[in-house]
Amino acid sequence: MNIFKSSFLIIGEGITFEHCSNFFKDNDIIYYSTTTNDVIDVKNSEIICKKKKIDLDKVDYAVISPGIPPTNPLLQKLALSGCKFTTDIEIIQNLSQSKFICITGTNGKTSTVNLLADILNDNNISAIACGNNGISVFSSLEKSYEYIILELSSYQLEHIKKVNSFISIILNLSDDHLERHGSLENYLHIKEKIFNSAKHKLMHKKLDHLDKYSTFEVRDKMFLINDNIIDGLSITDSNCISYLCKSYLIDGRHDLYNLCASISVLSIIGLSLESILSSFDRRKRLEHRVEKFFTFNDIKFINDSKSTNADSTSNALKSLENNIILIMGGDNKKMSYKILKKLINDKVKILIMIGENKDDLDKLIDVNIDKICYDDLEDAISYIFSVMVPGDTVLMSPATSSYCMYDNYQHRGNHFKELVKKYASQQN
């Protein structure tokens, strides 16, 4: 693909459209655009839209936004017309000379790509984290990087034909996005596309049923890579790890998983464990991930808005002590919450459910504690401030998305923090 002599059609909207169109404009590349909702029909090598027609004979490639499923009728009609599809990821891989480290998984993707980039840069190895983390993949062309750390979602991988990578890794898998992918088996099959053209292939131990891949895992007191215990590195308690008698603070169970995955990647690159952990200690912490943002009257408030499935909320609960007031709920996604039952019974004193799935959560999560439903987050916070006592921990870990209420998880998390500080100020 000679991108600078090609013409493109961008199908969709949102962040992929924005990043691609900006790049095409800046480089004087011919492109057209439309949304699936704007298209009336495809016939005679034309896309007939509500206010325009697009001549497919003038289009070399159609760039597909990840939010459009392959089953969309427009894509099927375009395929029958002979249109060639591509993605922003494949465009970048045709332009860049950097080595790619590609990361996918249900949870921890953004934290891990950012952690890897932080550790590499801290060791004078130039790297950028981009892709599904919200940083445009085209930003990786602005300077020469030794490594491009790509976060890839299952929606992106569904459209990508081939991912060229030095190292590819699947962090984990749980039943999320099944409304699009149909089954956990199909979801894993899509994730495994990340290995199609990878030199090094890494996967969490519990996913590797065929013994095909290099593996990593965290057990109760130890880290293992390819079933080998990492000498000197151990988990001492819920808040730190130890290496050769030196302690490093962690933010919770999810931090351990992200670190273990990062060690498995960085060991291939050749970084020493001491260098990795020293840089880990200086890492930039991301918002909305078991974020301890406020303390009031000896009550801790934790924002885990990034939690969009039960596994993520499970990790948050495992990272905290008892006396938790837990806020869950949002969109009504196809998902099992069985793994939360024992944790909630053991650690949570009040479960508050909000959003369009609150009634379903009330039925599905059968626990022996107080459960209360509210329509929105503000009503929930108002109630919490009337019943909380010193020693409690207020955790918002929704275990689902909330597009029924918010633009994204950042919007949700920021609203939670604003409400907590607002109600705290009223009690001072």
Image (tube, rainbow, N blue to C red):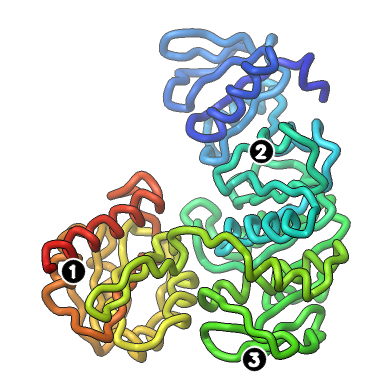
Q: Is residue 265 above or below residue 163?
A: below
Kind of residue at badge 1: Cys
Where residue 221 appears, x then y in whole percent?
64, 91
Quarter of the N terminus within the rendering: top right
When asked about the image quadrant of residue 91, the answer is: top right
Residue 137 circle label: 2
| Residue for badge 3 | 221
Where residue 182 appears, x then y in whole percent?
53, 57
SS state under label 2: helix
Disc 1/disc 3 C-alpha distance (Å): 38 Å
Disc 1/disc 2 C-alpha distance (Å): 41 Å
Kind of residue at badge 2: Val
Name the front one of labels 1 and 3. 3
Q: Is residue 376 left or right of residue 60?
A: left
For image coordinates 66% across by 49% down, the residue present is 129
For image coordinates 80% across by 84% down, the residue present is 227
Where residue 195 appears, x then y in whole percent?
79, 56
